[in-house]
Image (cartoon, rainbow, N blue to C red):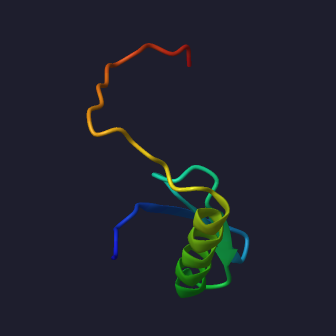
Amino acid sequence: MRRSFTLTYWRDDDWYVGCLEEIPGVFSQGETLEDLEQNIRDAYTLVRSERPPLLVPQRTESKEIEVEV
């Protein structure tokens, strides 16, 4: 199965650095944008293999809350 995520990236000197917005803790870097994309996929796979799958009950609820920023 394939899923799309948002890769947010920036330049840091000669490196592309980025993270997946939807998955906290998935960061990587690469010398080219293509390297970054592959490295971020590898980082996602590593994080996914280390964490047990998130089990979400069939019925969930949500609400907005305020947080001091």
Judging depth in this view, the residue of 46 and 14 nearest the camera is 46
Name, please, the residue furthest toward the right: 13
**Residue drawn at point x = 53 percent, y = 86 percent:** 34
Q: Is 60 placed left or right of 54 in the picture? A: left
Q: Is 2 placed left or right of 50 in the picture? A: left
Q: Quadrant of residue 27?
A: bottom right
Q: Residue 3, percent across and down?
A: 34, 69
Judging depth in this view, the residue of 58 and 35 nearest the camera is 58
Q: Residue 45, percent across and down?
A: 58, 73
**Residue drawn at point x = 39 percent, y = 42 percent:** 56
Q: Is residue 24 visible?
A: yes
**Residue drawn at point x = 63 percent, y = 57 percent:** 51
- Eyeballing the image, is 15 above or below 50? below
Q: Quadrant of residue 48?
A: bottom right
Q: Quadrant of the C terminus?
A: top right
**Residue drawn at point x = 57 percent, y = 68 percent:** 44
Q: Is 56 placed left or right of 14 in the picture? A: left
- Eyeballing the image, is 60 above or below 10? above
Q: How many marks?
A: 0
- Eyeballing the image, is 39 above or below 21? below
Judging depth in this view, the residue of 65 and 1 nearest the camera is 1
Q: Residue 63, percent across and down?
A: 32, 19
Q: Quadrant of the N terminus?
A: bottom left
Q: Residue 20, percent across and down?
A: 51, 59
Q: Is residue 16 visible?
A: no
